[in-house]
Image (cartoon, helix red, strand yellow):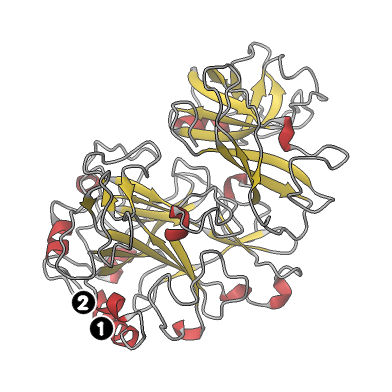
């Protein structure tokens, strides 16, 4: 069983000041091999998923996934939960990308890639926690963050990176301590990079989910979970600390001649994050019956006789065929889903929601083109922009590889949109090639303006089959859906005189486009 070697880990770590509490604390630590790597999550970027094979694009909270799944890639055979994170890519000097392989974690090397999962009660070994219930889900981290906005922000508490020496190196401290960083290391790691995700440990006791998948959970109001920090009154129920460890074998990319010449690091997460600050983890509970509660009540550590286990051989065989068929390995011209590499941060403040041109608070990530060596801004750029929010309907059309009104051809699989005559009159129209954020319920698509929709008024749009499928979760079909959409404002672009909202790149660079990220609660836009 996987715990046979964990004693060695505990003995080694206990010799280090500050690590002994972590090493001797009761915690479930187990491997979940890779189930599938694909863009099936409603988000548009590639992710690596582990756990039960009931994972699908909708994950209806009414379903008990532990009764639907027929296998799990985890070595605790009663755990059909799903755990997933973004995928790491190496970006070469010529701009191409190659997926970084995942490997089994230390003492769990028999796992095929995947994630090491922890469930940790408070370190005192006596404080009880309440296990999650069927339908519970949460997200930690923010995929749109590109810098440490606030030292005490939840994003800063939600992740860490460890740069391993060869053969795992010496265990010098607990995860997140010592020389661990909150961003991707900017130097080659001889033994690869481990990423930790630390989930909140307090629950409101009522909601199994929330619109942002975060508000129903919280970190302790002060102190830390492991030290017994109290939960806030708004989230009074202590839940187990869920922690992920994902190990990326970056060693094949350690040749300095492959790295950027400006001293920056070359790795990029699949949502276009070259910093590491946007790393995040998704969790959906799926343990059988009261199995997790039994494990927490028994403060399982080196083994857990109240749980059933399965061999690595069986766990490694639990896989799913990708639903989205696309190249994800080898050298790629773009990240899967054509996700852009994004860096700078722009903030749009909330204003009067009663007007037709509403102002909302967004974080806007600006993809930078022609930047060469990209450097992070020393601080976020603050500004206020007025964004037109359009509410209407969308139908489907087929670009079919033909040249559209905007002068370019796109395949049906591309994420493109056609706008009415209010916006598009010909190839020289200012909106041609701009980006549009489109939402339908909880799903969002960022599409390129490619064509004229002759029958569309100022509120309605046409979607390519690729955009339609991404937004509806269904294949091509006749019909009409309700959408909310907005065009990226001109103010986010630098003009021919290189004038724009802040010096976010070198003088020769232009701001290519923006992604809008809502950071406050309104019923209007979700991403």
Of all residues, the one furthest to the right in this rendering is: 497
Residue 373: x %, y % from top left: 75, 61
Q: Is residue 521 left or right of residue 296?
A: right
Q: In the rendering, which numbered label is found on residue 302?
A: 2
What residue is at 24 percent from the left and 81 percent from the top? 4
What residue is at 72 percent from the left and 48 percent from the top? 368
Q: How far apart are marks 2 and 1 (CA)?
A: 7 Å
- Are the residues at dot 2 and dot 1 in contact (C-beta closer than 8 Å)? yes
Residue 213: x %, y % from top left: 37, 42
What residue is at 29 percent from the left and 87 percent from the top? 11
For the image, the number of numbered tags is 2
Q: Evaluate whether residue 417 shows in this view.
A: yes
Is residue 1 placed above or below 49 in the rendered structure?
below
Q: In the rendering, which numbered label is found on residue 7?
A: 1
* Local secondary structure at mark 2: loop
* Local secondary structure at mark 1: helix
């Amino acid at each position: 069983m996987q715990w046979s070697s964990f004693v060695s880990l505990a003995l080694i770590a206990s010799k280090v000041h500050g690590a002994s509490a972590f090493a001797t604390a009761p915690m479930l630590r187990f491997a979940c091999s890779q189930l599938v790597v694909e863009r099936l999550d409603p988000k548009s970027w590639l992710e690596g998923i582990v756990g039960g094979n009931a994972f699908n694009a909708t994950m209806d909270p009414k379903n008990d996934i532990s009764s639907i799944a027929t296998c799990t890639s985890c070595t605790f055979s009663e755990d059909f939960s799903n755990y997933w994170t973004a995928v790491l890519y190496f970006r070469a000097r010529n701009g191409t990308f190659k997926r970084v392989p995942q490997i089994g974690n230390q003492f769990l090397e028999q796992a095929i890639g995947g994630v090491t999962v922890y469930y940790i009660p408070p370190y005192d070994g006596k404080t009880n926690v309440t296990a999650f219930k069927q339908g519970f889900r949460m997200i930690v981290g923010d995929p749109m963050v590109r810098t440490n906005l606030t030292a005490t922000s939840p994003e800063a508490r939600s992740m860490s990176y460890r740069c391993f020496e060869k053969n795992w190196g010496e265990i010098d401290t607990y995860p997140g301590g010592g020389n661990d960083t909150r961003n991707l290391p900017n130097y080659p790691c001889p033994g690869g990079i481990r990423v930790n995700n630390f989930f909140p440990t307090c629950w409101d006791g009522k909601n199994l989910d929330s619109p942002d998948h975060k508000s129903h959970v919280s970190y302790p109001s002060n102190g830390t979970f492991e030290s017994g920090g109290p939960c806030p009154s708004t989230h009074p129920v202590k839940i187990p600390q869920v922690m992920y460890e994902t190990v990326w074998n970056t060693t094949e990319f350690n040749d300095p001649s492959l790295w950027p010449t400006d001293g920056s690091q070359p790795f990029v997460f699949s949502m276009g994050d070259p910093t590491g600050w946007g790393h995040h983890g998704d969790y959906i509970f799926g343990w059988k019956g009261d199995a997790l509660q039994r494990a927490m009540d028994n403060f399982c550590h080196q083994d857990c006789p109240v749980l059933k286990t399965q061999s690595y051989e069986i766990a490694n065989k639990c896989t799913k065929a990708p639903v989205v068929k696309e190249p994800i390995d080898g050298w790629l011209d773009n990240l899967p889903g054509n996700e852009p590499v994004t860096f700078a941060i722009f903030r749009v403040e909330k204003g009067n929601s009663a007007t037709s041109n509403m102002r909302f608070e967004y974080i806007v990530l600006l993809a930078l083109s022609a930047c060469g060596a990209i450097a992070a801004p020393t601080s976020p750029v603050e500004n206020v922009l007025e964004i037109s929010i359009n509410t209407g309907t969308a139908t489907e059309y087929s670009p079919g590889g033909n040249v559209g009104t905007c002068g370019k051809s796109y395949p049906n699989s591309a994420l493109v949109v056609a706008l009415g005559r209010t916006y598009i009159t010909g190839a020289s129209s200012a909106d041609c090639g701009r980006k549009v954020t489109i939402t339908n319920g909880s799903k969002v698509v960022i599409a390129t303006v490619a064509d004229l929709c002759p029958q569309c008024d100022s509120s309605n749009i046409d979607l390519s089959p690729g955009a339609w499928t991404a937004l509806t979760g269904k294949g091509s079909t006749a019909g009409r859906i309700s959408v909310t959409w907005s065009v990226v404002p001109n103010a986010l672009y630098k003009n021919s005189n290189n004038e724009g909202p802040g010096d976010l790149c070198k003088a020769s660079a232009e701001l290519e486009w923006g992604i809008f990220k809502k950071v406050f609660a309104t019923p209007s836009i979700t991403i």
